[in-house]
Image (cartoon, helix red, strand yellow):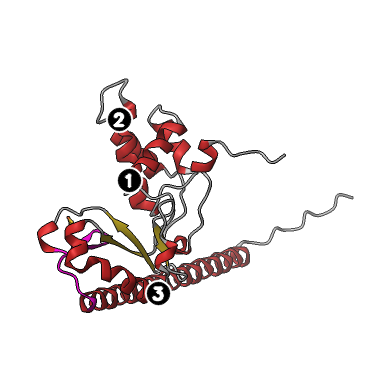
Amino acid sequence: MSETPNAIDAITAPISSPGEKFFPKFEVTPELVAKAQELVALYPEGKEQSAVLPIIHHVQEEFGYVSPEAMPWIAEMCKSTPIHVAGIVTFYPGIHRKCPGKFHFRVCRTIACALAGGEELLPYICSKMGVEPSEMTDEEPMVVSPDGLWSLEAVECLANCGYGPNVMVNDTLYSQVTRGKIDEIMAACKKELAAERKEAAAAKKEAAAARREAKAAAAAEATETTEDESATKKAAPKKKATPKKK
Ligand code: FES
């Protein structure tokens, strides 16, 4: 008989996403612990659980989403329980259990934006990203492009109703968005990625050059030491042989 997974297993089951290649894997570093402690310290003793949400936000900012591995760690930092953290993660639609794409588009689907043209924007963005609108479901509202570059989510009011349709890309809000504007935004995103990659390649090249330089300096130092040692040996007076006693 197959076992039915319990609620916590279902919530903490990993959901793979092509977007993962653009974000670091969750890892507990001294910096992450220090940040969590700093957030916990903002609340009085005995109220450490209040820091759950701020830490969740921080984790999402650093790693793109709140992974199953992150939840028990957050609970431990806040003297809470994994089920409490999982409850918060699943309650807020803005908190992701699945890694988004490098550029995450939130399209407002609330009435004012929908009537202003937001409804037609969704299929257009899907076609530009190479995803199907049917892939967005209530259980899995976010869809990620196969290359992990894009993700799309239909969200509720973005609090800019008079200027719809509104679309938020990562942390930037765009209003009165048209198809042409979507083209411009996506072109700017690609440009940003190209610049980031160029910068990363230059940094890698620089690091490799620094490593080569350090290696050459170490080798030169080793040669110098060997030469000094052999010079010292040559310069040292030879020990006279002690005459044998008859
Ligand atoms: S209805 Fe879209 S921002 Fe409010």
156 relative to 183, above or below: above
Q: Residue at x 15, y 64 (%)?
A: 164
Asked if the beta carbon under badge 3 is closer than 8 A to the nearest atom of ligand 1, the reply is no
Q: Which residues are magenta?
A: 164-179
Tell me the number on the disc at residue 235. Answer: none
Quadrant position of residue 238: bottom right
Q: Nearer the viewer, residue 25 or 98?
A: 98
Residue position for label 1: 58
Rendered location of residue 183, percent (x, y): 26, 78
Q: Quadrant of ligand 1?
A: bottom left
Verify CB contact (< 8 Å) between mark 3 and mark 2: no
Q: State the SS at label 1.
A: helix
Residue position for label 3: 201
13 relative to 126, above or below: above
Q: Amino acid at mark 2?
A: Ser
Q: Nearer the viewer, residue 26 or 98?
A: 98
Q: Residue at x 69, y 41 (%)?
A: 2
If you read the primary sequence from the N terminus, does the residue marked by circle 1 or circle 2 appear first? 2
Q: Amino acid at mark 1?
A: His
The answer to if 165 sits in the magenta stretch is yes
Rendered location of residue 172, percent (x, y): 21, 62
The CA distance from mark 3 to mark 1 is 27 Å
Q: Is residue 165 visible?
A: no
Residue position for label 2: 50
If you read the primary sequence from the N terminus, does the residue marked by circle 3 or circle 1 appear first? 1
Please count the marks in the image: 3
Rendered location of residue 218, percent (x, y): 50, 66
Q: Nearer the viewer, residue 7 or 233?
A: 7
Q: Is residue 116 left or right of residue 153?
A: left
